[in-house]
Image (tube, rainbow, N blue to C red):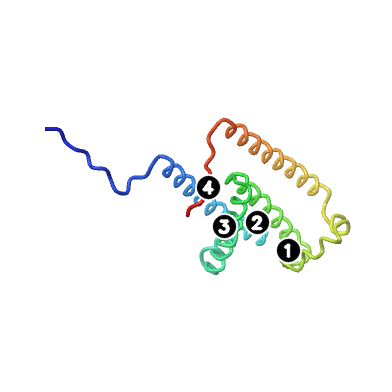
Amino acid sequence: MRKIKKKKKWAFSYKAQTILTGCLKTILVGLIMSIAGNFLLQFFQNQYSFSLAMNFAFNWHTELFLFGAFLLFVLYIWMTSLFGSRWLSALILLLGVLVIGVTTQQKMALRGEPLYPSDFSMIRELPFLIRMIDSKLILAMGIFLLCVVSIAVFILVRKKESTNGKDQYKLKQVG
């Protein structure tokens, strides 16, 4: 007598498994990037002191650290949905964290205070601000920015080449 195989009620199709795996990878990359990014911001603010950054993150102000990581995670998810690439979003988030971190470190070294949101209104005085920064730092930031933009363009071109011949997931209207 032949056995009849029962179908599992909750079996996922290959397409659903692929989508679920992609979502989990995106969330994992986002969590890692947001926690590492927030730690880098603390590292820069504490004048490259690893022990102070560790104490801030895990001993003194854990709730504040986790809230900052959550905000970076929300920013990462927003950029991922906007660009459609978890790696490009991670790269842009890392670039933003590094720029804000170096700016905070420079302001802490020169003025003894961190970068505040109101300081972004000084962007209108950019030539004045650039004169205050060491030319070697400007050159290093320029080279770093050029490398990051090159990597981002490479990722986008590679992604476009890989999806040209494949079926794309399409949203279907329900109802």
Distance between mark 4 and mark 2 Cα atoms: 47 Å
Residue position for label 3: 73
Q: Residues within 10 Å of mark 1 (few under 14, many from 20)?
A: some
* Mark toward the start of the polypeptide (4 vs 2): 2
**Circle 4 sits on which residue?**
171
Looking at the picture, which amino acid does disc 3 mark?
A: Phe
Which residue is labeled 2 in the image?
A: 48
Q: Quadrant of residue 39?
A: bottom right
Q: Nearer the viewer, residue 15 or 95?
A: 15
> Residue flagged by tag 1: what amino acid is it?
Met
Mark 4 or 2: the one toward you? 4
Q: Residue at x 56, y 64 (%)?
A: 65
Q: Is residue 52 above or below residue 145?
A: below
Dot 1 or dot 2: first in sequence order is 2
Residue position marked by numbered label 1 in the rendering: 108
Q: Nearer the viewer, residue 54 or 142?
A: 142
Q: Around disc 4, counting alpha carbons within 10 Å, would you say few (fewer than 14), some (14 to 19), or many (20 or more)?
A: few
Secondary structure category for the residue under label 2 = loop
Q: Secondary structure at mark 1?
A: helix
- On the image, the x and y values in percent for residue 26 come to 52, 48
